Amino acid sequence: MKFVVSSIELLSHLQAVSRVISNKNTLPILDNFLFSMEKGVLKITASDLESTLVTSLQLENTDGSGDIAIPAKILTDILKEFSDIPLTFEIDINAMSIVIQSESGKFTIMGQNGAEYPQMPVLKDDQKQSLEIEGEVLLSGINKTLFATADDELRPVMNGIYMELSPDDTTFVASDAHKLVRYKRTDVNAEAASSFILPKKPASLLKNILPREEGVVKLEFDDKNAAFTLTNYKLVCRLVEGNYPSYNSVIPTDNPYKMTIDRVEFYNVLRRVSVFSNQASNLVKLALSGNQLSISAQDIDFSISANERLNCQYEGEDMEIGFKSTFLIEILSNLATSDVIMEMSDPTRAGILLPSGSDDENEDILMLLMPMMINT
Amino acid sequence: MDLDTFFVSVERLQNSALEGKPVIIGGTSDRGVVSSCSYEARRFGVHSAMPMKFAKALCSEAIVVRGDMDVYTRYSKMVSDIIAEKAPVYEKASIDEHYLDISGMDRFFGCLQWTKELRQEIIRETGLPISCGLSVNKTVSKIATGEAKPNGEIEVPLPIVKDFLSPLSIRKIPMIGNKTYHLLRSMGVSNIGTLSLIPIEMMESLMGKNGIVIWKKANGIDPTPVMQYSERKSIGSERTFERDTMDIMGINDLLVSMVEKLAFQLRKEEKLSSVITVKIRYSNFDTHTLQKRIAYTSFDHVLIPLAKELFERLYTRRMLLRLVGVKLSGLVRGVQQLNLFEDTSEMIKLYMAMDSLRKRFGSGSVRRASGIKMKEFEEKKKCI
C-alpha cells in the first residue's frame, strides 16, 4: 500500500495516540502503531491491552489497503525532525518494509505483521448502553475529578473516576479516601441508571484529546469495557471491576458552620504558609474566630513557623481544624469561582468546599477533604 | 553531670524510710536483674545488671523496690529542664546523665563557679544528689564525674588531664567492658597511664578501629561534640516472662497492651510510624524478628492486627517463649491524615478522649480490656 501524508499532521496524530503506549509492555508488538488503510482512510491504533486509542486520517493520495505494525519510537523520532512537508509512505505488506520518501531522502523501517496486533475489544451488544455527551462537559467532568483519584494498588476501584448515570443527571466521583470530588451535571441524561469506573489512564488520555475535538462524544459501555467515539478518535478501555464505595454516605450532611472566603486569596495564603509546614505531614491549622481565619503551620524540626490572617464571612462557633496543605491547595486550584464556601461541623469530620455562585446552573460541584488529627 | 544512684534517690524522695538503708531497684522476681542500687548495698558487692537472686544472697537485708519508670522520667525531665534553662548546649546522654558544653561561660566568675552554682540549684530544686566533673572533653568529664561520686564535684583542667587519668584503672574508660579489660589485663596493662604509652599502631592491630579510639581516650583526646538533640529512630517495648510460656492467648493480649502504649506515645509526640517489628525469643535463646512496612500510622486499631499477624507468622516452633517485643520504627513527625471511609468521627473522638485521659492520669489509665487481663496473666504466671 502507498499513501502521501503531511509530516506535521501525521506527527500530531501519532503523538496523541502514543501516550497509550506503556514503557513496560508485556507484548513486544505493543511498542508499535498499527497502521490500517481502507478506502482512503488511514487508521492508527496504539494500545497497552487495557486502553486502545484509534485515530483516523482522511487521505487523498492513497493506493491499496492492508494492516502493518510500525515501531512507534523510531517513527515519531523521525517525524519530529521534518518541517511541514509531504511524505510518501510505501509499504510492502509481504516484506513488512516501510519506505518513507521525502523530496530528498529515503528512510527504511521494518515493520511487523499487522494481523498479530491485538484485536480491539468489542462491546457486547446485548449489554451495551450508550449515551451522547457534550465533549466539553466530559472534559470538565474529568478535569474536576481526575486529581482526586487514588494511587492504591490494594484498592483498584479507587484508582478511577466513578461515573454514575441516571435519567436525571450524570455524576463524576473520584476519591482517594482523603479527599473526594463529586461533580454532577443535570444536562447529561441517560436512559437508565447505570454506572462504571473509568481508570486513571484512559481518563487522562481523554483529558488530552478532548480539547482537540469539537462536538458530541458518543459513549458506549458494557460491564467490561467502555468506548468513547469522537470525530477523529476512538478510545476503548477496560473498566475497573468492582463496586465503588458508597460515597454519598460519607459526605456529611449536617454542617452547621459555614465560611465564605475569597478563593484566590485563600489559595495564595496557603501556598505561603505551607512552606513552613512539616515536610512529611504538610499540616496547616485553620483557626476560625469571628470573621477571621488564621492559617498557621510549623515545623518543629527546623524551628520555623508561619501564621497569616484572612478576613472571611463565618457563621459558627470558634474552631480549629487541621488539613494537609497540599490537598487543600489542589482542591482550591480545581475550583473556578471567585469565592468558595467551606462547610464544617467539627475537627474530626470532613470539610466541604463548594463554589460560591457558579455561572453554570447545570453543574453541581462538591469537594470534600478529611482533616488531620490534631491534639487540642 | 550524673545523678547519683538516680533511681534510689528518687525512691528515697518518695519514701524517707529508705534513707541510709541498702536499697535495690530492679525486677522483684528471681529472674529480674538489679537496675540500680544504693551505696549501702554496693558495699555488699551488689552492682547493677547483677541477677536479683544473686544480689539478695549477697545482701539479705536489702529493701527491693520494683521501680517506676514514669516517676524516674519525670524527675529526669525536671533536671533536664533546669539544665536547659541555664546551659548554652547540653546533651542528654541517658536518663541520669547530661553533658554540658559551657565554653564561654567562664565569663561568669569562671566555669567551676558556674558549674557549682548549677549543681547546687539542681540539688535545691529537685532534692536529688548529683555529681559533676568539669574537664576538656566528654570522656575526661565522664571519668571525672565517676571519681567525684557520691555527691561531689571535680575539676580537671587541661594541664593535669594526664596526671588525673594515669593512676586510674583502665575500667574507668567508658568503652572498656569486660572482654577488653581482660585482654588488656592479660597484657599487663592495668592503669590508664600504661595504656596511653602503648603505641597506637599496636592498639590498632590488637583491636582494630576501636583500639585507636580507646588509645585516644586514654590520652585524654575525645573530639566528639556535645550534641544537643538526636532524633529517635524507633520506639519499642519488650517483655521477658517470669517463666517461659506457651500461653498464646496471653501473649496476644500482651502484644495488644504493648502496641497500645507505643501508639499512644507516637500520638503524644505527634509522630507516625511506617515499620512494625515483632521479636520473639525461644527458651533456648533463639531470637527471631519479623517486620513489615506499612502506611504511616499511629492508630492502635491498625497496628494491633499487624502485630498479631506478625507474631503468628513468627511463632512456628512448638517451644516455650522467653521474650516477646514490639518495635515501631521509620518514624516521621506528623499527625494522622484521616480516612474518609475507615475513620469515623466517633472513633477519632474516642482516641482523642482516651489520649487526653492518658495525658492527665498516665498512659495506663485507660486501656483495652485485653490489656487489663495482662495483670491477671502475670499473677497467674507467678502462681504456677
Image (cartoon, rainbow, N blue to C red):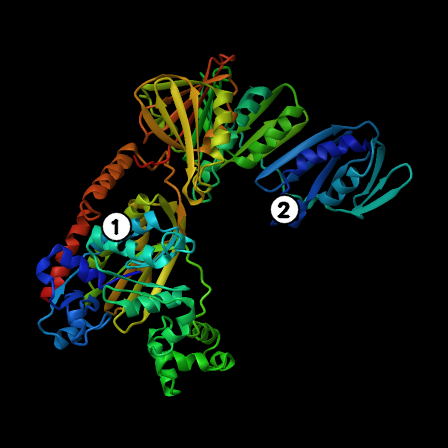
Query: Percent from the top left, x then y, of residue A346?
Result: 31, 27
Position above or below: B343 against A331: below
Query: Percent from the top left, x then y, of residue A264?
Result: 51, 21
| Secondary element at image label 2 | loop
Crowding at mark 2 (Cα within 10 Å: few <14, some 14-19, many 20+): few
What amino acid does circle 1 point to?
A: Met
In the displayed structure, does residue B103 sit left or right of residue B63?
right
Can residue B256 be seen in this snapshot?
A: no
Looking at the rendered structure, which numbered label has been put on residue A361? none
Quarter of the rendering occupied by the N terminus of chain A: top right
Position above or below: B149 against A7: below
Query: Percent from the top left, x then y, of residue B361?
Result: 18, 44
Crowding at mark 1 (Cα within 10 Å: few <14, some 14-19, many 20+): some
In the displayed structure, does residue B118 sit left or right of residue B68?
right
Residue drawn at x 42%, y 67% is B158
- State which quadrant residue A356 falls in: top left
| Contact (Cβ within 8 Å) of mark 2 with mark 1 | no
Query: Percent from the top left, x then y, of residue A141?
Result: 52, 24
What amino acid does circle 2 point to?
A: Asn
Q: CA distance from mark 2 to mark 1?
A: 60 Å
In the displayed structure, does residue B321 sit left or right of residue A363?
left
Q: Nearer the viewer, mark 2 or mark 1?
A: 1
Quarter of the rendering occupied by the C terminus of chain A: top left
The chain containing the residue under callout 2 comes to A
| Secondary element at image label 1 | helix
The chain containing the residue under callout 1 comes to B
Tell me the residue that label 1 is attached to: B78
Q: Extreme front residue here?
A: B109
In the rendered image, residues at marks 2 and 1 fall on the same chain? no
Residue drawn at x 37%, y 17% is A291
The one of B271 and A246 positioned closer to us in this rendering = B271
Looking at the rendered structure, which numbered label has been put on residue A23? 2
